Image (spheres, grey):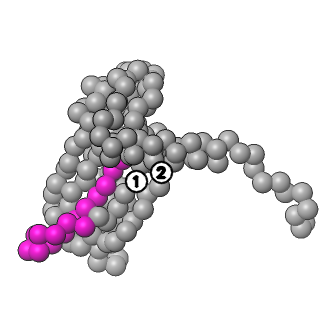
Amino acid sequence: MSSIVLRFLAEPSTVNFGGKVHGGTVMKWIDEAGYACATGWSHNYCVTVFIGSIRFHRPIMIGDLVEVEARMAYTGTTSMNISVEVRSGDLKGGKMVRTTECLIVFVAVDSHGRPLPVDAYQPKTPGEIALAERARAHLDAARKVADAPPPSLSGAAD
């Protein structure tokens, strides 16, 4: 399965102090949809190893219909790079708008936590190919930052 959409209503138990759905709750939904997509693809237990570029565009209101769509962007040897988009809208209006998006990486693991190989994902449509290229570019940039030496403290005031 290269994509999945979870749908549900935003409940009052998810409210933050501002009266909107808590960002941590949205991140939980993203992780759950990503897990479902990764597990469906690999047919194995999967663990989250990276969440990047999370962007909150607008709040989700209590009572909104929420859609969390997880789509395979590309695969490595053991990793699955998944794009997740969250949309929400008032049921009475019927219009869904993008509220949150991010890239999430999962790794399939065995019962001892060792990585397992996953089938290669081959994007076919122009949209799928563009998504794979964006995901690769983002992860390459994140790796460069992670591999960069820490800033020098020479010349810093004592």
Relative to 31, 139 lies left or right: right
Q: What is the quadrant of the C terminus in the image? A: bottom right
SS at mark 2 in the image: strand
Residue type of the residue flagged with mark 2: Gly
- The answer to whether one can see residue 64 in this image is no
Q: Is residue 92 magenta?
A: yes
Query: Residue drawn at (16%, 64%), measured in percent from left and top?
Result: 65
Please determine whether, in this image, residue 105 is positioned above or below residue 116.
Answer: below
Q: Quadrant of the N terminus?
A: top left
Residue under the point 29% across and 46% down: 70
**Reading the chain from its start, which is encountered first: label 2 or label 1?**
2
Measuring 43% from the left and 57% from the top, which residue is drawn there? 54
Asked whether 133 or 14 is in front, the reply is 133
- Left or right placement of residue 133 versus residue 126 in this view: right
Give the percent coordinates (x, y) of residue 87. Answer: 25, 62
Between marks 2 and 1, how big is the CA–CA gap? Answer: 6 Å
From the top left corner, tell me how far across and down residue 128 is, in percent. 33, 42
For numbered disc 1, what is the local secondary structure? strand
Q: Which residue is mark 2?
A: 52
Residue 74 lies in what quarter of the image? top left
Say whether marks 2 and 1 touch (CB < 8 Å): yes
Q: Residue lying farthest front?
A: 126
Instruction: Identify the magenta region.
Output: 82-97
On screen, residue 68 above or below 97: above
Q: Which residue is mark 1?
A: 102
> Which residue is depicted at the point 39% across and 65% down?
56
**Residue 58 at what x, y percent from top left?**
34, 71
Q: Is residue 52 left or right of residue 149?
A: left
Kindly identify the amino acid type of the residue bearing the numbered disc 1. Answer: Cys
Please tell me the numbered disc located at residue 134: none
Rendering quarter of residue 3: top left
Q: Check the image and report above or below for 78 versus 10.
A: above
